[in-house]
């Protein structure tokens, strides 16, 4: 077949998908089945913005295990709450900060300013000056803000308590200031609250909204709704959706993770397309199950936003673990492998202290585990490990991301 024909054939190939992008994690659906209660709780906690704006600065904690809809619930609340208030002539901005992407105070403040379209001078401002500019801007525009710190624990672990304190305790010493900034803290694990100062911690414990893992019944509704948007009508067999819902439903021994359920559905659709099948069946889901690793999906967000050299160090660790078939590798070996890897792809390797810092960042993001070896001949060494897998799938993900990041940088 000529290249021309191959291209034509691929372009004309029928797909089961009507809009595949609606299944990606960034997509915001119109409805949120089974999260109405949490939406109501959020509205109740931010009601002061409608009735007595500026009276106080609210802080709310959103907790739930992986894929329970924390991010999407916060984003949709932010999108629609601010729209409703605008109808009443109140200007409230919603800002969603992904702390995997922005883990330094400076970058977080910069992102808040950007998302609020606040013009900043070209000369480098400090985090504090930028924060003042944001507060001033809100004053001048007579508007308010809700800032969601998604996976805030990552930010707190890397930048420290003081950095979080800087953001959230703004008004503590100024009783009569108009309180314009409010916060939503998002985390998978409430024990992360200990990363905050004790006043914020105890406040948040009293303003907590919990998202439970989804049951199979709930997942069924969610999958049906999302499949209706992503696929042509009648393409996904009812049994295929049921299969996923029962596999992942918390009441059936699954994790209740909607992210995993939706990824499975998308992958099953892609497999159906590849096979030229007009329907998505249970068999396609079964095939999808064998290739998708729930453990890797858990960390995929964290990995996605890693800076290039942290990603390269992670890749080096994966390669070593695969090659040595050991459960741990030493920091020294990992660094040597990292240098070889950098050289083989034409990247300048970073210095030793920097590489050590990368390893600590990977640990803080729960992407790797570390321990110190018992005293050996050369004293104590740090040992690195990855407690999930399969490593082949992880390596594939890293390889794709490295290629993507290097493409963006050049
Ligand atoms: N009730 C729901 N209705 C429709 N889609 C949902 C619902 N809950 C979750 N989703 C979808 O499931 C996926 C995972 O949700 P989300 O990213 O909000 O989970 P999360 O709790 O933030 O997970 P993580 O801890 O991994 O960050 C997203 O694509 C989201 O749109
Ligand atoms: Mg999330």
Image: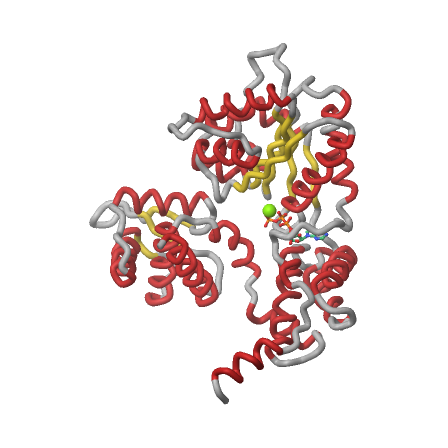
Q: Is residue 5 visible?
A: yes
Residue found at the very far bottom of the displayed protein: 1
In the depicted structure, whether residue 193 falls above or below residue 394: above
Q: Which one is nearer the viewer's eye here, 62 or 250?
A: 62
Residue occupying the point 63% across, 45% down: 71
Q: Quadrant of residue 265?
A: bottom right
In the depicted structure, whether residue 229 falls above or below residue 167: below
Q: Tell how many labels.
A: 0
* Image coords of residue 278 (percent x, y): 70, 78
Residue 314 in the figure: left or right of residue 55: left
In the depicted structure, whether residue 316 falls above or below residue 175: below
Residue found at the very far top of the displayed protein: 176
Residue occupying the point 25% across, 46% down: 352
Residue occupying the point 67% across, 48% down: 69
Residue found at the very far left of the displayed protein: 377
* Colour option used: secondary structure
* Image coords of residue 44 (percent x, y): 77, 30
* Image coords of residue 153 (percent x, y): 52, 38
Residue 390 in the figure: left or right of residue 19: left
* Image coords of residue 32 (percent x, y): 75, 49
Q: Which one is nearer the viewer's eye here, 183 or 92?
A: 92
Residue 162 in the figure: left or right of residue 88: left
Q: Which one is nearer the viewer's eye here, 356 or 3?
A: 3
Q: Quadrant of residue 247?
A: bottom right
Task: Pick the quarter of the image with the C terminus.
Answer: bottom left
Q: Is residue 198 visible?
A: no
In the depicted structure, whether residue 327 falls above or below residue 16: above
């Amino acid at each position: 077949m000529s290249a021309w024909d191959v291209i034509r054939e691929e372009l004309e190939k029928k797909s089961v998908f009507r809009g595949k992008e609606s299944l990606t994690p960034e997509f915001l659906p119109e409805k949120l089945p089974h999260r109405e209660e949490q939406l109501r709780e959020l509205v109740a906690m931010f009601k002061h913005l409608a009735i007595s704006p500026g009276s106080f600065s609210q802080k709310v904690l959103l907790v739930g295990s992986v894929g329970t809809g924390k991010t999407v619930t916060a984003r949709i609340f932010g999108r629609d709450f601010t729209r409703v208030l605008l109808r009443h002539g109140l200007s409230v901005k919603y800002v969603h900060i992904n702390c995997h992407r922005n883990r330094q105070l400076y970058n977080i403040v910069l992102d808040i300013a950007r998302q609020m379209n606040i013009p900043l001078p070209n000369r480098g401002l400090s985090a504090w000056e930028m924060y003042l500019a944001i507060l001033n801007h809100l004053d001048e525009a007579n508007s308010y803000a809700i800032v969601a710190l998604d996976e805030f624990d990552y930010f707190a672990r890397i930048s420290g308590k003081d950095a979080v304190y800087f953001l959230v305790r703004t008004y503590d010493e100024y009783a009569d200031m108009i309180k314009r900034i409010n916060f939503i803290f998002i985390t998978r694990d409430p024990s992360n609250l200990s990363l905050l100062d004790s006043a914020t911690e105890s406040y948040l414990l009293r303003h907590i909204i919990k998202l439970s893992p989804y049951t199979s019944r709930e997942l069924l509704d969610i999958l049906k709704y999302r499949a209706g948007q992503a696929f042509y009508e009648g393409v996904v067999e009812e049994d295929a959706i049921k299969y996923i819902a029962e596999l992942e439903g918390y009441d059936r021994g699954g994790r209740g993770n909607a992210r995993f359920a939706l990824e499975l559905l998308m992958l099953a659709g892609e497999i159906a397309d590849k096979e030229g099948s007009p329907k998505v069946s249970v068999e396609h889901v079964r095939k999808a199950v064998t290739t998708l690793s729930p453990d890797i999906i858990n960390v995929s967000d964290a990995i996605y936003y890693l800076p290039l050299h942290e990603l390269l160090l992670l890749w080096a660790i994966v390669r070593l673990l695969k090659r040595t078939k050991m459960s741990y590798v030493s920091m020294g070996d990992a660094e040597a492998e990292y240098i070889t890897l950098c050289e083989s792809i034409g990247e300048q390797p970073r210095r030793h202290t920097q590489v050590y810092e990368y390893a600590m960042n990977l640990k803080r993001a729960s992407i790797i585990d570390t321990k110190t070896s018992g005293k050996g001949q050369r004293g104590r060494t740090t040992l690195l490990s990855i407690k999930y897998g399969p490593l082949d799938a992880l390596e594939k993900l890293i390889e794709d991301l490295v290629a993507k990041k290097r493409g963006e940088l050049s």
